[in-house]
Image: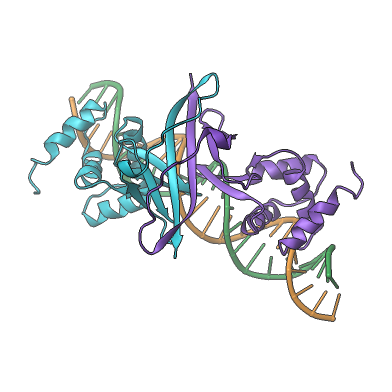
Chain colours: A cyan, B purple, C green, D orange
Amino acid sequence: MTTKRPYRDLIARLKDAGLRPTRQRLALAKLLFGACDRHLTAEQLHAEALEAGVRVSLATVYNSLHQFTSAGLLREVVVEPGRSYFDTNIEDHHHFFYEDSGSLQDIPTEQLRLTSLPDAPSGTRIARVDVTIRLSKN
Amino acid sequence: MTTKRPYRDLIARLKDAGLRPTRQRLALAKLLFGACDRHLTAEQLHAEALEAGVRVSLATVYNSLHQFTSAGLLREVVVEPGRSYFDTNIEDHHHFFYEDSGSLQDIPTEQLRLTSLPDAPSGTRIARVDVTIRLSKN
DNA sequence: GTGATTGCAAATCTTTTGCACTAAA
DNA sequence: TTTAGTGCAAAAGATTTGCAATCAC
């Protein structure tokens, strides 16, 4: 588990994305892509890294998250003023947002499919469609 | 145009919402609700107020926007990290977001209707569904 | 070696807050 | 009056940036 083995894929993944597999990027990538799909803020990822014994600065976490996003490894999700989430699921999908806890959850694709979309205004094209279902407590 | 006439409705509107029709709130309400539907940031509204010769502090603009939102006169829309828009259209509707200019535009209701939604997870109810179509330049 | 990456601290930007002052009822 | 509302300046958060030190290749 702590061998070099699990880094194999990650190194390739970073290289393919044009990013040098530095110690920090690898450690962050491992936390992000190691397990299931996740929705994390920079702050949260930074805390996880420190807990895992990875020395990395918050600035580098921000930089890495944006680099991963530009490279298409992550998706940035904005649902609250003043806070960005980074989603490891880059498939086409949508979100539940729990207003009370501020957490995000993927909506299974088959449960929400947009059948018809408006045309993009002339001179533009649709880059992405985000559906957020905001949930409050009963 | 600068008579007291146009304030009649606004005064009633604020009073109905449980807000004292102060000079600042009235002026802001006039800018917000005077014409067509708008999408404004606090900063933008503050600038407009100053241009219109209304002396009001940015803090009061923020306060008023949130009070209007709580009162159901406005809707807060979050599409970009670190910036909130306030939408004078409180009907059920969705948005185009122009990524290059950072501006919002309503999508005519009939052009995007969600036919099926997932059930709300137990213990929660759907407070709102936001669809944002992100547009980039061709 | 050399250019990319990192860490730190300072800067920036939006938004909120505390509190004395002012205005609406 | 009396209580809500306002303005200011300071504080708070999240994020970014500049630059010297460090690391990957």
Q: Is residue B59 visible?
A: yes
- Asked which quadrant contains residue B43, the reply is top right
Q: Could you tell me which residue is drawn at 74 percent across and 62 percent down?
A: B16
Give the left or right position of residue B9, taking residue A16 as reference.
right
Give the left or right position of residue A35, taking residue B134 as reference.
left
- Asked which quadrant contains residue A111, the reply is top left
- View extreme (front): residue: B115
> In the rendering, at what x and y percent does residue C15 appear?
57, 52
- View extreme (right): residue: B3
Q: Could you tell me which residue is drawn at 30 percent across and 36 percent down?
A: A91
Q: Where A138 sits versus B57, above or below?
A: below
Q: Could you tell me which residue is drawn at 44 percent across and 46 percent down?
A: A132
Q: Is residue A99 visible?
A: no
- Total numbered labels placed on residues in the image: 0
> In the rendering, at what x and y percent does residue B77 appear?
55, 45
> In the rendering, at what x and y percent does residue B25 appear?
76, 55
What is the quadrant of the N terminus of chain B in the image?
A: top right
Give the left or right position of residue B130, taking residue A52 as reference.
right
| Closer to the camera in the image, B48 or B69 | B69
| Closer to the camera in the image, A99 or A14 | A99
> In the rendering, at what x and y percent does residue B79 appear?
50, 41
- Asked which quadrant contains residue A23, the reply is top left
Q: Could you tell me which residue is drawn at 58 percent across and 49 percent down?
A: B76
